[in-house]
Image (spheres, rainbow, N blue to C red):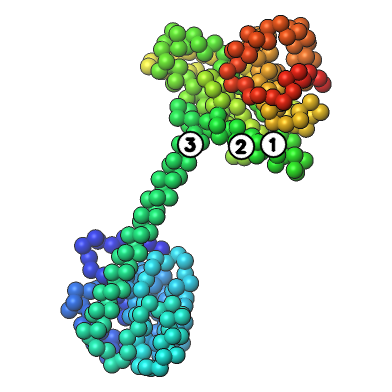
């Protein structure tokens, strides 16, 4: 629990003692030194006040009814929701074992009754200085964690669209594919490429092209589930990874996204245009999909079949249409298609034929 205080205010000290005279004496002395004070007459009240408004320091008597000071210290230090609160134990017992018990319970220091106020002032200053150092350390650690998180996010995110970048996608697909194989769960890959995107840049400029890609990314982000991954694989090509999804369901998903893009009006600088997208879909398990490289290549090739057979279509890698198109090509235009597909991954079996 964090309490916002006026930065110019003095430290607040909670006095916990079941003797009212002791409380009043300590309160008067502490306030004369510039501290703010609060008081509790027993351990239960002290714990309630600590939970409600954590003080900067607790001056805690050991011998109290209901819940003694040892137990109060133990509970305060065990409460991870509380900030660091120094505890100075007050005890009339000068035996070493009593002091050790208090320190082991979580007390940070102790002072023996009757209290020497010069000693008390020194111990208060020391404990509050440690508290300030602790708070400064925690703040530096918080800032470091935030900086590391920003760096992690930047290393995994495409700057333009805010989706996963290619490097992160390639890392995640390896992990997700192996996870699917271990659990024998289906896993689908969808490749999406915006149709006639070059004309957007050529006609309206690259800033317009960037605006279109950002809007496309928002559509993809809206359509995927929380467990899916959506990323920009390169240029106007996007990859969608769908764990737990069989091929038919992945095709249905891609068709839904295709319709969303077809119906969307892309706007920039007062201009409105319409564009479509072509999709290729592959999935595991399949006898022709031995690894994730081939999974991606299958979806990528299916996407290019979609573009070459009219655009604005969804093609699955094992369809008759796909195999017939590849058979008609007979590999004659493969170098040209490879040159266009700047995003292809290397595959273990470049000669694989996709069959139903």
Residue 155: mark: 3
Which residue does the image show at 44% across and 45% down from the upper left? 148
Q: Position of residue 68 (x, y in %)?
A: 44, 86
Inter-mark Cα distance, 1 to 3 = 22 Å
Circle number at residue 172? 2
| Residue 222: x %, y % from top left | 55, 32
Question: Disc number at residue 355?
Answer: none
Question: Residue under circle 1?
Answer: 177
Sequence order check, earlier mark of 3 and 2: 3
Verify CB contact (< 8 Å) between mark 3 and mark 2: no
Looking at the image, residue 338 sits to the left or right of residue 150; the answer is: right
Crowding at dot 2, Cα within 10 Å, few <14 / some 14-19 / many 20+, comes out as: some
* Quadrant of the frame with the C terminus: top right
Label 1 sits on a secondary structure element that is helix
Residue 243, given in percent of the width and then of the height, sits at: 68, 37
Q: CA distance from mark 2 to mark 1?
A: 8 Å
Badge 3 local density, few (<14 within 10 Å), some, or many (20+)?
A: some
Picture residue at 48% right of the left edge, 41% below the top = 152
- Distance, label 3 to label 2, CA atoms, is 13 Å
Q: Identify the mark nearer the N-term, 1 or 3.
A: 3
Q: Locate residue 15 relative to residue 162 in the image: left or right.
A: left
Q: Residue at x 69, y 31 (%)?
A: 292
Res 49 → quadrant: bottom left
Towards the viewer: 209 or 121: 121
């Amino acid at each position: 629990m964090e309490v916002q205080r006026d930065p110019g205010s003095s430290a607040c000290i909670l006095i916990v003692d079941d003797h009212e005279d002791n409380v009043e004496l300590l309160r008067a002395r502490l306030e004369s030194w510039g501290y703010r004070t609060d008081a509790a007459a027993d351990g239960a009240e002290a714990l309630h006040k600590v939970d409600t408004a954590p003080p900067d320091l607790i001056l805690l008597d050991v011998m109290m009814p209901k819940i003694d000071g040892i137990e109060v210290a133990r509970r305060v230090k065990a409460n991870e929701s509380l900030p660091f609160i120094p505890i100075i134990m007050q005890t009339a017992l000068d035996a070493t074992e009593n002091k050790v018990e208090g320190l082991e319970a979580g007390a940070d220091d102790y002072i023996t009754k009757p209290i020497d106020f010069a000693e008390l002032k020194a111990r208060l200053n020391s404990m509050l200085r440690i508290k300030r150092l602790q708070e400064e350390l925690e703040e530096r650690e918080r800032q470091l964690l935030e900086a590391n998180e920003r760096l992690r996010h930047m290393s995994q995110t495409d700057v333009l669209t805010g989706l996963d970048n290619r490097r992160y996608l390639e890392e995640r697909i390896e992990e997700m594919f192996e996870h699917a194989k271990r659990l024998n769960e289906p896993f689908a890959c969808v490749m999406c490429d915006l149709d006639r995107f070059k004309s957007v840049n050529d006609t309206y400029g690259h800033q317009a092209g960037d605006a279109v890609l950002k809007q496309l990314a928002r559509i993809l982000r809206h359509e995927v589930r929380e467990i899916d991954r959506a990323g920009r694989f390169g240029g106007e090509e996007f990859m969608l990874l769908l764990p737990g999804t069989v091929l038919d369901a992945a095709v249905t998903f891609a068709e839904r996204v295709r319709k969303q893009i077809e119906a969307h009006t892309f706007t920039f600088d007062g201009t409105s245009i319409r564009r479509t997208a072509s999709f290729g879909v592959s999935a595991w398990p399949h006898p022709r999909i031995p690894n994730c490289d081939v999974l991606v290549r299958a979806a990528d090739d299916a996407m290019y079949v979609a573009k070459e057979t009219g655009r604005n279509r969804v093609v699955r890698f094992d369809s008759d249409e796909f195999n017939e198109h590849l058979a008609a090509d007979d590999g004659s235009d493969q170098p040209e298609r490879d040159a266009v597909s700047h995003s292809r991954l290397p595959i273990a079996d470049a000669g694989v034929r996709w069959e139903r």
